[in-house]
Image (cartoon, grey):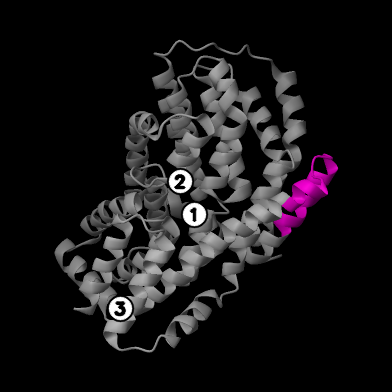
Amino acid sequence: MTTAALFGSLVLLMLLRVPIAVSLGLSSVFGLWLSGISMEIIAQRMLATNNSFPLLAIPFFILAGEIMSTGGMSRRLVGFASSLVSHMTGGLAAVAILSSSFFAALSGSNAATVAAIGGVMNQPMEEKGYRPEYTAATIAAAGVTGMIIPPSILLILYGVVTGVSISDLFLAGMVPGILICVSLLLLNRFLTSKQEVEKTAFQGGQEIWASFKQAFLPLLMPVIILSGIYGGVFTPTEAAIVAVLYGILVGAFYRELTLASLWRAFYKAVLSSAVVMFIMNAAGVFAWLITINQVPQSISAHMAEFAGGPIVYLLLVNVFLLIVGCLMNAAAAIVIFTSILYPAAMSFGIDPVLFGIIVSVNLSIGTVTPPLGVDLFIASAITKVSIERVVAAIWPYILVLIVDLLLITYIAPLSLTLVRLVG
């Protein structure tokens, strides 16, 4: 009865459009009251949720992304991507996709990627004749790589919840992230071949070299971060701090990071971090409550019995998480549903690192899927296109992302080869 009331109240609050963190918190309070458990446990569970050294990486990577966006790095990355692909069919849209992948390796956030690259690319794409809704859909879809290419905030959360090595998860996310980027580029080429958009002339090797020199320092950051992690120089959390310091130094070197812009970056990072941590705290209480009621064990056992094997189980997980991603914030979904799905995955012998990539790709697709896809709303706000028009244009990208998901799910070496080579 408590479990049904718990989930029922959560669904009701979400249908009433109560913010997800508040919905989780209020439904947890209701569940505790029905169970006769003291409300003091809320503070204890919130403290336990936050008492994690790896979790510190999230606010620092968010801050690093804001600093890099403010310090002129996103513009230089767009310039380098433009020199590589802008002359091709659908060139500027390809620039948006490729530069999003570059920026994802700096920020680890889909929302930051969409906001930063969308702000730079919206007007140039409009001037070249791209349909506004296509521009918005492309910018939104390209942001998916921000949740897969390391450093990824979703992978950090998964590592904190399950205890799986965050370094291994980062390494495993590289090839899937590249796969998603390439598939979006190919789809864009196909879709824009039927549109009348103005092409940009190829500037030649000198232009590529000049833009590469401009973007060299931003491109060097993920190399420093990842080589430091896998070289044993620092942990992922310490890497996030290094990323912040590196962003400040590079922004100062470019003379685009002033004290005022640095203050704005800190302010935005505090707001974004507060939202993520509020969701994490509320989800932590909710997850603890369903755990003591044996919900994860019960659901996991039933799913394992119904699936009968890892192939069907992963298909069920994909369908389930695609639905969840449409309706719930990805951070909350990671905390709540990983504890439910993870035990059965381990019982089937599914690699925990691979399972983390599958979960993250599923929930990243949710950021561009109606009705609650956050990237859709950010792209809509940037391009001034109604959300209905953006949704109508995003479906080809969603279908390709689902194909990518199936490839990542059932071709394990895509995620695990680098982990095994380095490990």
For mark 3, give the secondary structure.
helix
What's the magenta region?
A: 242-263
Q: Is residue 262 magenta?
A: yes
Name the residue type under label 2. Answer: Pro
User: x%, y% of residue 382?
Assistant: 53, 34
Gap between marks 3 and 2, in whole Å?
A: 39 Å
To which quarter of the image does residue 218 belong? top right
Query: Which residue is at the far left?
Result: 306
- Left/right placement of residue 69 relative to residue 392 reads right
- The residue located at (63%, 47%) in the rendering is 106
- Reading the image, the residue beneath label 1 is 172
Foreground pick, 39 / 92: 39
Q: How many marks?
A: 3
Name the residue type under label 1. Answer: Ala
- The residue located at (60%, 21%) in the rendering is 124
Using the image, determine if residue 294 lies above or below residue 265.
below
Using the image, determine if residue 330 lies above or below residue 117.
below
Gap between marks 1 and 2, in whole Å?
A: 8 Å
* Mark linked to residue 176: 2
Using the image, determine if residue 180 lies above or below residue 240.
above
- The residue located at (73%, 38%) in the rendering is 72
**Whether label 3 touches label 2, CB < 8 Å:** no
- Reading the image, the residue beneath label 3 is 31
User: x%, y% of residue 348?
Assistant: 27, 67
Q: Earlier in the sequence, mark 3 or mark 1?
A: 3
Q: Earlier in the sequence, mark 3 or mark 2?
A: 3
